[in-house]
């Protein structure tokens, strides 16, 4: 995203990128996926350049460059649970 903003060409992610994304999502605390959990304690859940858009961009890159297989579908479910947890926070 930074390369795009700076109008420079960036290298596309390698095929191992999908495994890295899957490992990252699997390594998130279980409370991140629970309604009323600690999802807002995660750095990427905040507004700004490192926010949720980065998470969505990673899912897109995984689908395009690493193949949208079983891992990708499982990651979509992870992110769906995370978004539901964010939406369940009444203060937002």
Image (cartoon, rainbow, N blue to C red):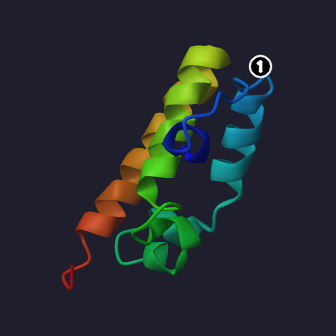
**SS for callout 1:** loop
Examine the rendered structure and indicate whether residue 15 appears above or below residue 84: above
- Residue underneath mark 1: 15
Which residue is found at the position 69% from the left and 23% from the top? 12
User: Can you say which quadrant of the picture contains the C terminus?
Assistant: bottom left
Q: Residue at x 64, y 17 (%)?
A: 65
Residue 9's x, y, as percent? 65, 27
Judged from this view, the residue extending furthest toward the front is 7
Left or right: 47, with 90 as reference point: right
Q: Pointer 1: residues within 10 angstroms few (<14), some, or many (20+)?
A: some
One can see residue 87 in this view: yes
- What x and y, as percent, mark residue 80? 37, 47
* Residue at the far bottom in the pictured view: 91
Q: Where is residue 83 in the image (x, y as percent from the top left)?
A: 34, 56
Q: In the rendered image of this protein, does residue 40 appear above or below residue 61?
A: below
Locate residue 31 relative to residue 90 in the image: left or right: right
Whether residue 68 is visible here, answered yes or no, is no
Q: Residue at point 44% right, 77% down?
A: 40
| Image spot of residue 35 (x, y percent) | 35, 70
Q: In which quarter of the image is the N terminus?
A: top right
Residue 39's place in the image compared with 23, above or below, is below
């Amino acid at each position: 995203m930074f390369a795009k903003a700076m109008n420079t060409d960036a290298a596309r992610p390698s095929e191992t990128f999908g495994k890295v994304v899957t490992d990252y999502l699997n390594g998130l605390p279980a409370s991140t996926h629970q309604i009323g959990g600690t999802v807002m304690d995660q750095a990427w859940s905040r507004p700004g350049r490192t926010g949720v858009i980065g998470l969505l961009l990673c899912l897109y890159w995984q689908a395009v460059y690493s193949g949208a297989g079983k891992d990708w579908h499982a990651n979509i479910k992870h992110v769906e649970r995370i978004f539901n947890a964010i939406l369940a926070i009444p203060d937002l």
